[in-house]
Amino acid sequence: MRQRHLRCPAFAGLLQGFELVRELSKDRVPGGEMRVVVVGGGVIGITTAYYLAEAGHEVVVYDRQKGPAQETSYANAGEISSGYASPLAAPGAPLRALKWMLRKDSPFVFKPNLDPIFWRWLAQLLRNCTAERYQANKALMMPLAEYSRDMLRVLRQATGISYDEGSHGTLQLFRSQEQLDRAAADTSVLDRFQVPYEILDAAGCINAEPGLAAARDRISGGLRLPDDETGDCRLFTERLADLCASRGVVFKYNTRVHAFPHWKGKVHRIVTSEGVTEGDAFVLAAGPYSERFMRKLHQRVPVYPLKGYSLTLPVADGQAAPVSTVIDETNKVAITRLGDRIRIGGTLEMSGFDVTLREERRDLLERSLRELFPGVDNLRDASFWCGLRPMTSDGPPIVGRTKLPNLFVNTGHGMFGWTMACGSAKILADTISGRQPEIEADGLGPQRYWA
């Protein structure tokens, strides 16, 4: 793919192109590269650091945890599902949420609080629950997800990185004819972006996932995306961080970032628990905590944490276990094979920044596995986890330059951080480096909230 350099009009509304390049060039370290400070050591922050280092920049990564991928990236569902990249805000979503709340084992949990940030975010989400907004937002997410999957494949081939990866597709399993019929609405978007898919009957689902044979009477059909992949996000992030370190990236763990002081329209340093660090450009990739930093800078972005849960257990019987990812549409649970383990992920809990591990959320995950893969009976050996997904109110992540021209943001990926990580990071690294991203990315920036 050929790249074109950015022209000055792309910076309209921020600074004239010549002036911006001149200002940034003054701060560049010898050789033309810049010193870039990345805040956040999850999969988004580490992939951003990797592509920045590949572009020749000096990179420093800060994270409050003891190492990479200790929060949201630690034990997610393991899916790299570009075809399923869709906004949470969708037509009919509020009604479905109300129906789910009536279930004792609901996949959706709503715990209202007095935080005005939450209520503002929720109101914005509800405004996006129209057919028109859903289609527009999904049209931003799918190309990014497809591009990200392709970038991951290139990275894997270039580095030889391994992370219990698999390339056997995703099967969205429908237990009712109504669910199967409703799936037809989303296939039009798949057709538009030329994403391969298969509509399967029960026999076709079992052919794709033989472990489902014992649950044949629960299956009405499925939607299979053969190009989707799977992998352990934490393992990938840890090993990519090691690769970054071998290429000169500096990691500052166990360090809290407090502020981004700025003057004359630019950020010049960050204030941390270990002192002050200067840089030429700064990337905010702090997941749901990015909103707090942006608010202090008087730049509001609608990002809010939605808690998810997962179980991880060893594979006791390979014949009874899933081959790849099976999404239980009824319970909104993903069951994924990760090498010699199974990861079961699900539940959407609106409870703010609370990271309490609630045992009652475990029941839905266990039941989904038992009903679809009854041959897997070693749930007593499962480890239980929860994490906060940074969700935007409209769906697409926020990737781009802020109102401060040398401060960039890469956050808000929601349930698709693992799916979109490499693509988002490559786009941002290209932008920081003054190169035209390889796909259209204007609609992903924070400026979409500035009107």
Image (cartoon, rainbow, N blue to C red):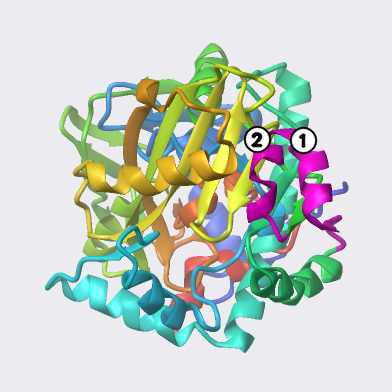
Q: Which residues are magenta?
A: 194-220
| Residue 239, x across and y down, in percent | 54, 18
Badge 1 amino acid: His
Q: Nearer the viewer, residue 74 or 201?
A: 201
Q: Earlier in the sequence, mark 2 or mark 1?
A: 1
Q: Is residue 450 among the parts visible in the rendering?
A: no
| Residue 161, x across and y down, in percent | 66, 18
Question: In the rendered image, which residue does mark 2 sit on?
Answer: 230
| Residue 323, x across and y down, in percent | 70, 31
Badge 2 amino acid: Thr
Question: In the rendered image, which residue does mark 1 sit on?
Answer: 168
Q: Is residue 134 above or below residue 397?
A: below
**How many marks do you count on the picture?**
2
Mark 2 crowdedness (10 Å alpha carbons): few <14, some 14-19, many ≥20: many
Choose top left, top right, bottom left or bottom right for residue 257: top left
| Label annotation for residue 320 | none
**Residue 118 placement, left or right of 136:** left
Tell me the distance, in whole angstroms, between the alpha carbons under discs 2 and 1. 8 Å
Secondary structure under tag 1 reads loop
Mark 1 crowdedness (10 Å alpha carbons): few <14, some 14-19, many ≥20: some
Residues under numbered marks 2 and 1 in contact, where contact means CB atoms less than 8 Å apart: yes
Choose top left, top right, bottom left or bottom right for residue 322: top right
**Residue at the spot 62% in from the left edge and 20% down from the top edge:** 339
Residue furthest to the left in view is: 114
